[in-house]
């Protein structure tokens, strides 16, 4: 299977109060196409920094990051923005949306930015509607972002993140701000998206979320300390077994 | 604890607090400057006249020389001694000079168009003031004060020398002390200005020279209306008489500049007030999180409100102090534009006004802040937890729909932001409108004053060149119509010989007659054209005088005797009252609308002639402005002893060079409008940068480039500014009519047609303002480049 993401000797250093803080230390890993990888680790271990560095949001201090064949660290700001627009999707813990646009407009906005033609825009509108149908939020399409629940909003954010059919989807604590039921709904959708072929890399504290992934990277003090591979949800849909397996592994890792 | 929190807030919200501080400084500067200038301008002439100690009525008489026939002066004194409405009067002596009586070293001629009145600095009639508004209490021998307009027209400065000579036995050089302020004869619109000397020098000129001599009577009355009526009925010959109220009106041209300044001040106050409210409400809304958290840990509403009020108090005090300091030179700079001819309230008084205004603004800010903190009561800990979204808002925000839209996403986002949160952009919208109004008013006024049709409102017909020469003074003194006719033929021949086309050559002669209707009498200026037809003039009501017994009246004259079209009026000539029918009313800016126009064949009393505009020449059709200017230059070279002016130059002289003043004010206003727009935009944009950092970060994660984010933000500003400017353009001309139109009305032209040059007023200048503002907006937005994904999480 082809590589969706390749990270080589990634380092990220911050200077805080004239002191050097090495947050990521020579991290290397790959994510294959169609994988759903979770990054876990204690607070301050460098999970989010890793996610932002590999997704080109943050410039790494050293190392290389490849999305398929494209090397990110050498890209200009403009090329990086185009990369994010066309080939990456992002989901955050807080459901950030433009407050003056309704849900549907928020979802299709990145696609409108990418495709300027009239015919393409008509396709975008129908694709946006299709995604909303899939994620069961059709009825909130015309709603204001303050008129919907957190779970609905996060599902809308997922729609927006995949509207341009990205090569890879990055998610930073995607269920962190949701209740258990909404969280499960959102994860169900993410698994389905993954099963449809979208590669996902997510950062989470939540074992239940991580248990739905095919691979878990454990990061501690800026280094990947361990890696656990789980069968896909299609192959092993017994969630309890997956969670137990993950739980034991995490205990072993010192979680 | 309370103060620790306050200090922490001031430090943590540094950018926001600096923005509020900047706004306070801006508001205080504008408001203090504006109020100070408004007081100065509105009290302008009243204060000036009060300081000058001017009496109720003045009469100027003239004789050939001081030993000539004194009977006219005796008549005036006899009348004043016997009139029951006169409480007292004083007499001062004057000398009358023309421009040929002045010499400036190195200059071929002195730029003075009308007769100049010489007097001593110490007269009974009034006090004079120097350029610094100090009363002139002494003058060294050998020095002279001259009016500002002479200094300006001849490019003179204090210390330059000017010689006065009667070309016979008298010649003396004087050092110019500077310009001075003269309440009775100092207005730009006043035809005759004054120069003043020391007592000894004036006595010397009086005894040794052969200049024309006259007296100025200054009268105190206990009933001005009755006195004027009696005086007008007495039909005494004088060269000028005027009451204090009319004298104040002669400052109307100076007041146009002041009026523009006044409008500028009012507009700046409106902008400041709107912006202030916007900033305070905006910043308090921004702090919902802190307020929610404070509530969650049990801090009372009153304590939270107190904290914000103390913070705004501190900002208001610091901002007001700085704003007050800036307003002092700023107010002086603006006021200097209008204070050339009038004495405005002293520096001390205006500083007190500025101080009071600054304190008032500080108090308003604190009250506004206190009022705005009412919202604290509504905010709950949930607002902090839910980042301000309490789920209780049901009003639809998005008005436009992206789906199906042909707009670029950034354009769409800009438009929908504006339409969804209109209140946020009101200040900028108003700034856009007001900016155009401020520009349109002086530009439309200047263009109107410079238009070809303006001649029609100066009791004459349009022409291409104006010829003024010393010999015309002789014609007026000798009151010799034949000499005028001969002179015109001579000038025409010279022009024709030089291949300059002369389609029409004509001349307006000014006279003064007593006109009565019933028991109402008025001593009015009158105009008679030589080689013109009464049908060639513009009339607002009725038709041109068709017969010798018909007259057209200026609005002021008609109003003075309560005459309408069709009324019968009586005009005194050679002591005999002649009957006339009023056939028309017309607007004229000569003598503030006082005028009588007779039929071209009417026989008039030539002894009443007291002036002329000069000889006017029309080249005919088919000559563009360049060709006309070439012919004017050629005429000037042919007519060596005459001053040949274009119509525009002549009208500009008549209205005291106001176009030039407005022109310089136009540039000042353009700079102020651009600065205000820029300040408003920069400060708004800085606030948006702080508030919308998260959204910008989010857009960047979605793949929007820095350029896209900047485009979204800039388009938002541009859309609002453009909308404001568009409304400003649509309403600009009506606004000019309402404001400048009133001034023209006072000047005697209530129905003036504004000359609007849309390209200049509603395209070129707005475009300059728009481009300058948008460029600065883009530069401010460059900070977007520093926004990262981390900004999604927190703001500031």
Image: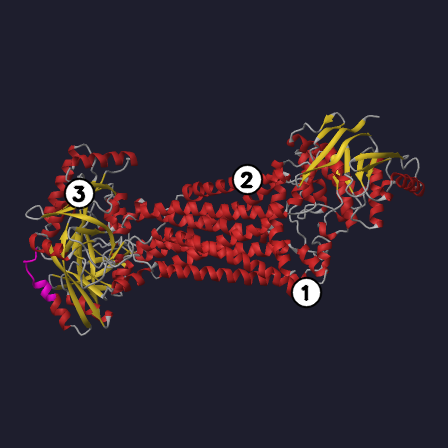
Chain letter of the residue carrying label 3? B
x, y (%) of residue B9? 62, 54
Please state if A57 lies on the left or on the right of B29 as rendered: right
Q: Secondary structure at mark 1?
A: loop
Badge 1 vs badge 3, beta-carbon distance below 8 Å? no
Please name the residue that numbered disc 2 is placed on: B778
Q: Nearer the viewer, mark 1 or mark 3?
A: 1
Q: Residue at x 21, y 69 (%)?
A: B220
Q: Earlier in the sequence, mark 2 or mark 1?
A: 1
Q: Is residue B519 left or right of residue B417?
A: left
**Which residue lies most toward the front here?**
A19
Q: Which residue is mark 1?
A: B300
Q: Earlier in the sequence, mark 2 or mark 3?
A: 3
Q: Which residue is mark 3?
A: B104
Relative placement, left or right, of A245 versus A197 is: right
- Mark 1 or mark 3: which comes first in sequence? 3
């Amino acid at each position: 299977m082809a590589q969706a993401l390749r990270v080589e000797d990634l380092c990220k250093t911050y200077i805080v109060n004239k002191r050097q803080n090495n947050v990521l230390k020579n991290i290397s890993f790959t994510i294959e196409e169609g994988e759903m990888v979770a990054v876990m680790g204690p607070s301050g271990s460098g999970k989010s920094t890793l996610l932002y560095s590999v997704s080109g949001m943050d410039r790494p201090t050293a190392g290389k990051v490849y999305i398929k064949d494209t090397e990110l660290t050498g890209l200009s700001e403009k090329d990086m923005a185009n990369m994010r627009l066309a080939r990456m999707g992002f989901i955050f813990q807080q459901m950030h949306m433009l407050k003056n646009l309704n849900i549907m407009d928020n979802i299709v906005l990145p696609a409108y930015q990418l495709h300027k033609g009239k015919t393409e825009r008509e396709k975008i509108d129908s694709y946006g509607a299709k995604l909303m149908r899939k994620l069961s939020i059709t009825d909130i399409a015309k709603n204001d972002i303050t008129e919907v629940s957190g779970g609905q909003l996060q599902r809308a954010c997922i729609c927006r993140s995949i509207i341009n059919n990205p090569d890879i989807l990055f998610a930073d604590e995607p269920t962190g701000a949701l209740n258990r039921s909404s969280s499960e709904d959102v994860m169900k959708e993410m698994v389905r998206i993954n099963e449809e072929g979208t590669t996902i890399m997510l950062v989470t504290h939540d074992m239940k979320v991580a248990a739905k992934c095919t691979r878990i990277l454990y990061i501690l003090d800026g280094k990947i300390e361990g890696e656990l591979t789980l069968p896909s949800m299609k192959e092993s849909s017994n969630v309890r077994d997956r969670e137990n397996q993950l739980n034991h592994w995490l205990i072993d890792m010192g979680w | 604890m309370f103060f620790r929190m306050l200090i922490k807030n001031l430090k943590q919200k540094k950018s926001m607090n600096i923005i509020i501080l900047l706004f306070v400084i801006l508001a205080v500067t504008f408001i203090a400057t504006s109020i100070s200038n408004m007081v100065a301008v509105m009290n302008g002439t009243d204060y000036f006249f009060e300081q000058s100690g001017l009496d109720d009525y003045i009469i100027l008489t003239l004789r050939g020389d001081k030993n000539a026939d004194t009977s006219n002066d005796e008549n005036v004194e006899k009348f004043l001694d016997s009139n029951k409405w006169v409480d007292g009067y004083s007499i001062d002596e004057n000398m009358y000079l023309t421009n040929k009586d002045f010499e400036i070293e190195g200059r071929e001629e002195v730029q003075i168009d009308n007769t100049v009145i010489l007097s001593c600095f110490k007269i009974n009639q009034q006090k004079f003031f120097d350029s610094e508004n100090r009363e002139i209490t002494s003058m060294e021998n050998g020095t002279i004060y001259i009016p500002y307009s002479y200094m300006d027209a001849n490019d003179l400065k204090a210390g330059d020398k000017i010689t006065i000579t009667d070309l016979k036995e008298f010649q003396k050089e004087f050092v110019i002390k500077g310009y001075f302020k003269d309440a009775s004869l100092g207005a730009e619109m006043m035809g005759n200005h004054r120069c003043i000397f020391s007592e000894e020098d004036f006595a010397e000129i009086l005894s040794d020279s052969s200049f024309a001599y006259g007296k100025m009577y200054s009268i105190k009355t206990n009933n001005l209306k009755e006195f004027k009526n009696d005086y007008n009925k007495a039909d005494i010959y004088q060269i000028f008489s005027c009451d204090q109220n009319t004298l104040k009106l002669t400052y109307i041209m100076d007041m146009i500049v002041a009026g523009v300044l006044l409008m500028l001040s009012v507009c700046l106050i409106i902008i400041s007030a709107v912006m202030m409210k916007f900033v305070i409400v905006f910043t308090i809304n921004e702090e919902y999180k802190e307020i929610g958290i404070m509530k969650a840990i049990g801090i009372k509403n009153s304590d939270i409100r107190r904290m914000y009020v103390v913070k705004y108090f501190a900002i208001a005090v610091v901002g007001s102090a700085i704003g007050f300091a800036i307003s002092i030179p700023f107010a002086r700079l603006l006021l200097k534009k209008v204070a050339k001819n009038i004495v405005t309230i002293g520096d001390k008084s205006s500083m007190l006004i500025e101080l009071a205004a600054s304190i008032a603004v500080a108090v308003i800010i604190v009250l506004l802040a206190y009022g705005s903190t009412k919202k604290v009561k509504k905010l709950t800990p949930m607002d902090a937890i839910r980042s301000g979204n309490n789920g209780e808002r049901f009003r639809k925000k998005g008005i436009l729909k992206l789906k199906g839209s042909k707009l670029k996403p950034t354009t769409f986002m800009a438009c929908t932001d504006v339409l969804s949160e209109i209140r946020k952009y009101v200040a900028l919208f108003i700034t856009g409108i007001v900016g155009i109004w401020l520009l349109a008013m002086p530009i439309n006024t200047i263009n109107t004053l410079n238009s070809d049709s303006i001649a029609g409102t100066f009791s004459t017909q349009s022409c291409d060149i104006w010829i003024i020469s010393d010999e015309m003074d002789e014609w007026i003194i000798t009151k010799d119509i034949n000499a005028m006719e001969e002179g015109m033929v001579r000038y025409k021949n010279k022009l024709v010989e030089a291949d300059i086309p002369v389609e029409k050559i004509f001349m307006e002669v000014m006279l003064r007659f007593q006109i009565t209707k019933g028991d109402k009498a008025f001593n009015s200026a009158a105009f008679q054209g030589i080689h013109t037809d009464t049908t060639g003039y513009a009339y607002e009501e009725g038709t041109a005088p068709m017969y010798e017994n018909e007259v057209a009246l200026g609005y002021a004259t008609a109003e003075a005797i309560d005459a309408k079209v069709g009324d019968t009026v009586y005009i005194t000539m050679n002591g005999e009252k002649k009957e006339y029918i009023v056939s028309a009313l017309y607007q004229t800016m000569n003598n503030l609308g006082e005028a009588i126009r007779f039929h071209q064949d009417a026989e008039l009393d030539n002894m009443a002639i007291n002036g002329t505009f000069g000889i006017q020449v029309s080249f005919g059709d088919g000559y563009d402005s360049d060709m006309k200017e070439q012919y004017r230059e050629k005429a000037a070279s042919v007519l060596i002893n005459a001053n040949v002016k274009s119509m525009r130059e002549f009208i500009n002289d008549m209205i005291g060079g106001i176009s030039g003043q407005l022109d310089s004010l136009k540039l000042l206003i353009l700079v102020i409008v651009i600065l205000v727009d820029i300040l408003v935009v920069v400060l708004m944009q800085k606030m948006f940068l702080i508030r919308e950092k998260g959204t910008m970060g989010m857009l960047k994660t979605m793949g929007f480039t820095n350029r896209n984010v900047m485009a979204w933000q800039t388009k938002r500003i541009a859309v609002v500014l453009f909308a404001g400017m568009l409304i400003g353009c649509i309403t600009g001309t009506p606004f000019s009519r309402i404001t400048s139109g009133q001034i023209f009305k006072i000047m005697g032209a209530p129905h003036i047609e504004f000359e609007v040059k849309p390209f200049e007023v509603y395209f070129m200048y707005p475009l300059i303002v728009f481009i300058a503002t948008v460029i600065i907006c883009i530069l401010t937005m460059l900070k977007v480049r520093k926004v990262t994904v981390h900004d999604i999480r927190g703001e500031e």
